[in-house]
Amino acid sequence: MPTSRTARPIPVAARVNRFSYAIRNIVTEAKAVEARGMRVRYLNIGDPVAFGFQTPLHLVEAATRAMRDGHNGYLPSAGIPEAREAVAADYRSRGVAMTAERVLITTGTSEAIDLALNALVDEGDEVLVPSPTYPLYTAVMAKINAQPRYYRTDPDREWQPDIEHLRSLITPRTRVLVIIDPNNPTGAVYPPPVRRAMLALAEEHNLTIVADEVYGELGFDGPVPLLGTIDPDAPIISLSSLSKAYLAPGWRTGWLTVSATPRLDDALAAMRKLADGRLCSPGPMQYAVAAALNGDRSHQVAFRAALAERARITTESLNAIPGISCVAPRAAFYAMPAVSLPPGRTDEDYVLALLRETGILCVYGSGFGVAPERGTFRIVFLANPKELESIYADIGAFTRDYLQRDHR
């Protein structure tokens, strides 16, 4: 055996340095704050279960029954037939032609994003993503060395996409248009004319649409129609999961569907090939998909009402703070307020100061692709109403002091 060892560190792949996921990265600083004895109030991750919302019992029973019945081995890489057919039937009931053969069960929507982008995008290709965006899209693109092209959404128009700006970004290397509707991180819902305009633009330039519809059943005015209802022939890969509307984020059970157009047959084959390489998504939880989609959804009525109340408190409380503005969310459990920053300060400066002085953990907007000087930050408003009121009172007191400081 060698008697001496080198002190040189083992190198890591360069792609890791390109990979960033702000929603989780900021937790490192939160743990440092906790180590100093301060309680941290986590408003960074959209996990309803962490705030007391319970997974519906009939889903738990279905997953438990599967384990007890011995369904603990490997499953088909595309997912069990019962789950795929349940997803297809749900899409058909909501107005989109779908067969089980064009459904893949995935390890949450996160894996669906990874499969779709890896199947569609080569190194150096471009993907259109909204600004602000859900940062996993750009993290995956960094990993595969693809290029994000951020299209503006406008807070003065309830965070609606700027179609002309979107059009101006398209180049011969553009492959995919990502549409997150209802939107994370802004809580926006896109009206039919905006959706039609985006579909028309994708058609004009032969782009595949990746439609992130995981919050579709959490519109405060009721479920939001699937994008595929507008044009059944559009090349749409739709993503969703049990995580949010069915209150089971830790189960990591999601799906993607591929619209009926033959134009996407090769993409479907590519995603299935990639899925084969990871064997299968978590097994027993797949047996809850049919229970979720075919069973009682009454929990969603109460959940939407609870979210709408929290959204109202959030919007009213934040807009009452001098220096902060907040567009009212229309779905999900996120808001994207903006603070008027002092010269030379960034959104990350503000968020880190808020965390260190109050223990309130949000995520800075530049982690979602927004310019840091705009002062945006994302809030998860799943906490109970009284706690939210206390949190917003603390944000108000902190912000009033922060904006009066000498930041030279």
Image (cartoon, grey):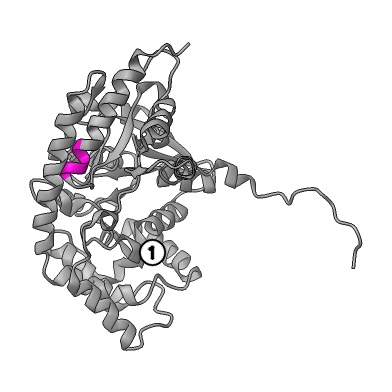
Question: What main secondary structure does the magenta stretch of the protein show?
Answer: helix
Find out whether residue 314 is within the magenta segment: no
Q: How far across and down, in percent of the image, does residue 331 sit?
A: 17, 44
Q: Residue at x 30, y 66 (%)?
A: 102
In the image as oriented, which residue stretches furthest toward the bottom?
69
Q: Quadrant of residue 167?
A: top left
Categorize mark 1 by other alpha carbons within 10 Å: few (<14), some (14-19), many (20+).
some
Q: How far across and down, in percent of the image, does residue 136 sit?
A: 41, 47
Inspect the image, locate mark 1, and give the three-letter code of the amino acid beneath it.
Thr
Q: How many numbered tags mark residues here? A: 1
Is 33 located above or below residue 224 in the figure?
Answer: above
Look at the image and give the residue range highlighted in magenta: 385-389
- What residue did someone put label 1 on? 107
Is 316 located above or below residue 344 in the figure?
Answer: below
Q: Residue at x 26, y 18 (%)?
A: 323
Q: Quadrant of residue 58?
A: bottom left
Q: Is residue 22 left or right of residue 82?
A: right
Q: Is residue 367 left or right of residue 198?
A: right
Q: Residue at x 75, y 49 (%)?
A: 9
Q: Is residue 111 left or right of residue 88?
A: right
